[in-house]
Image: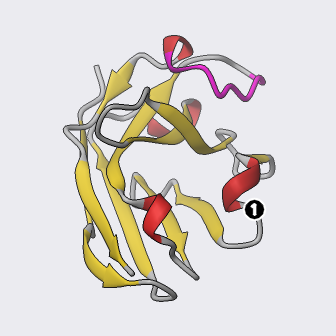
């Protein structure tokens, strides 16, 4: 069982930055692929980024490449999402997720087993 708690969301102007954190409980955090997803009002949940259990491989959706960086600290059971050059279209509830999928990286929400409660990110124009 893994419990995930996100923090770091808020209101920021376009062009600004935020860093989201996701603290995980459980002794097996380092064995999970971690992902960040987001859901805007009236839209489906979409994958933003994911990172392998060792941190050597990452995935980013095209619209955030070059602006967002996912990282993890297995000693602290924490995964981060650094978001720079934020745009109004990045406004959404951001969710952290953990998936036990071995060596794969996945952008499909169905591959993730545990979810946080979400944190709101609002980017004003």
Q: Residues within 10 Å of mark 1 (few under 14, many from 20)?
A: few
In this rendering, position of residue 83 left or right of residue 115: right
- Determine which quarter of the picture holds residue 72: bottom right
Q: Main secondary structure of the magenta part?
A: loop
Check the image and name the residue furthest to the top: 110
- SS of the residue under disc 1: loop
Whether residue 105 is in magenta: the answer is yes
Magenta range is 103-109
Along the line of sight, which residue is nearer the eye, 24 or 20? 20
Q: Residue at x 38, y 65 (%)?
A: 20
Q: Position of residue 90 (x, y in %)?
A: 47, 60
- Determine which quarter of the picture holds residue 28: top left
Q: Position of residue 88 (x, y in %)?
A: 44, 68
Whether residue 57 is in magenta: the answer is no
In this rendering, position of residue 34 left or right of residue 43: right
Q: Residue at x 19, y 38 (%)?
A: 117
Q: Residue at x 70, y 46 (%)?
A: 61
Q: Residue at x 26, y 67 (%)?
A: 9
Which residue was labeled with disc 1?
A: 65
Count up the numbered dots: 1
Can residue 34 be seen in this snapshot?
no
Instruction: Work out whether 21 lies above or below 48.
Output: below
Instruction: Work out whether 94 lies above or below 10.
Output: above
The N terminus, quarter of image = top left
Q: Position of residue 84 (x, y in %)?
A: 56, 80
């Amino acid at each position: 069982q893994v419990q995930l708690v996100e923090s770091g969301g808020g209101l920021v102007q376009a062009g600004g930055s935020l860093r989201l954190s996701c603290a995980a409980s459980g002794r097996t955090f380092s064995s999970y692929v971690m992902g960040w997803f987001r859901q805007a009002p009236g839209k489906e949940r979409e994958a933003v980024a994911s990172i392998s259990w060792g941190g050597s491989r990452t995935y980013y959706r095209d619209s955030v490449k070059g602006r967002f960086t996912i990282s993890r600290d297995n000693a602290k059971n924490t995964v981060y999402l650094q978001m720079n050059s934020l745009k109004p279209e990045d406004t959404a509830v951001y969710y952290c997720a953990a998936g036990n999928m071995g060596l794969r990286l996945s952008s499909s929400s169905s591959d993730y087993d545990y979810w946080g409660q979400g944190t709101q990110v609002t980017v004003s124009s």
